Image (cartoon, grey):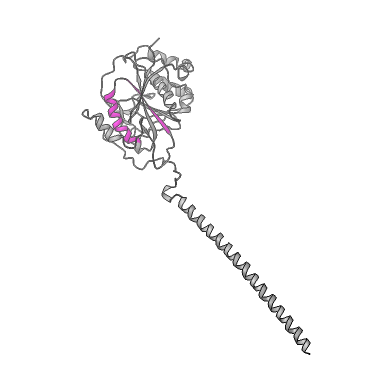
Amino acid sequence: MAGNFKRLFNFLALFSFVSVACFVLVLFYSRRSFEQVAKLLAKKIEASNKSSEMAPTPSAVSLTLGPCPDNPPDLVGPLLVEFDFGRTWEHVRKEVSPLLQKGGRFKPKDCVAKQKVAIIIPFRNRHEHLKHWLYYLHPILKRQLVDYGVYVINQDGEGVFNRAKLMNAGYVEALKEYDYDCFLFSDVDLVPLNDRNLYRCFDNPRHLAIGMDKFNFDLPYKTFFGGVASLYKHQYLKINGFPNTYWGWGGEDDDIYKRIVLRGMQVSRPDLLTGRYRMIKHQRDVHNDPNPKNPDKLFQTHWTMNADGINSLKYTVKSIEKDILYTFITVDIGSPE
């Protein structure tokens, strides 16, 4: 009997010892696992804090801008245009240079313009007119939310003036600087009287200056295409640009109109109220007298347009000046043959 109690006691003692040993082992490894888990969590929290510090704040994140509206909200409609000849260049720069980039460039900051417009001005000895043009047009173009650049193409020397050839040179020079897809050609002495006359391109070549004050705000004749006009790049190339052979005053606008029609396009225009312009009065420039040979060339347009245009253009750049208000490019375009 005593032997049985002794064996039972030994068994219970061994069982207790093994149980305590197992409990100690479980407690030891559980503590190590807890420490490892704690260390892992600490590392994750530290990494998360670092990434939070490196992440940009919402204000620093660049947002994708949407397209500019077809009808810009800041347009005012009819404008009062007065040519104050006491206005100085310093005053003009102070008034209109904010937000402009060097070379007369501007981009809307809150939206993406749907077109990139090169504004090309054929020029010689018209600095007073240019001052008024810049004073009025830059604010208008900004309100119209146009991505644009102003290129003044100055004819070198005092030879016979050639407006259309200067415009061709302007087209080529503008494309060297930016991937413009719309080209607007404007005389330097014409200022619009309504900022809803949009300086952009349309489905058809656009004639904007349809109601000049010198014509009593009316279209002088149906095929008139003078003053201010715009064409998409593909429209311009479709008509082989403008003729290079119209030296002196007159004829090139009618030739351009014929090219458009001969290539199966139509001319679009704003209404007569929107398309009003005021012209700065001046005497005709020296060496820009009417050329009696020009009218006869209009009878040859359908034959000459394929060989006379952007594909036959020859000129030499003499200088390029980058002002905050414009890019001034002086070119040698030669002389009549």
Q: Residue at x 28, y 28 (%)?
A: 131
Q: Residue at x 43, y 16 (%)?
A: 314
Q: Which residues are magenta?
A: 116-141
Quadrant housing residue 94: top left
Q: Which of 73 and 3 lies nearest the eye of the viewer?
A: 3
Q: In the image, is 9 to the left or to the right of 242?
A: right
Residue 332 lies in the magenta stretch? no
The residue most toward the bottom is 1
The residue most toward the top is 337
Asked if residue 311 shows in the view, the reply is yes
Q: Which of 7 and 70 lies nearest the eye of the viewer?
A: 7
Q: Residue at x 34, y 38 (%)?
A: 143
Quadrant housing residue 74: top left
Quadrant housing residue 121: top left
Query: Can you give x and y, in whole percent of width and height, for residue 319 in the image?
Result: 37, 20
51 w.r.t. 268: above or below: below
Query: Can you give x and y, in whole percent of width and height, for residue 36 in the image?
Result: 58, 62
Q: In the image, is 169 to the left or to the right of 85?
A: right
Q: Residue at x 47, y 53 (%)?
A: 52
Q: Which quadrant holds the C terminus?
A: top left
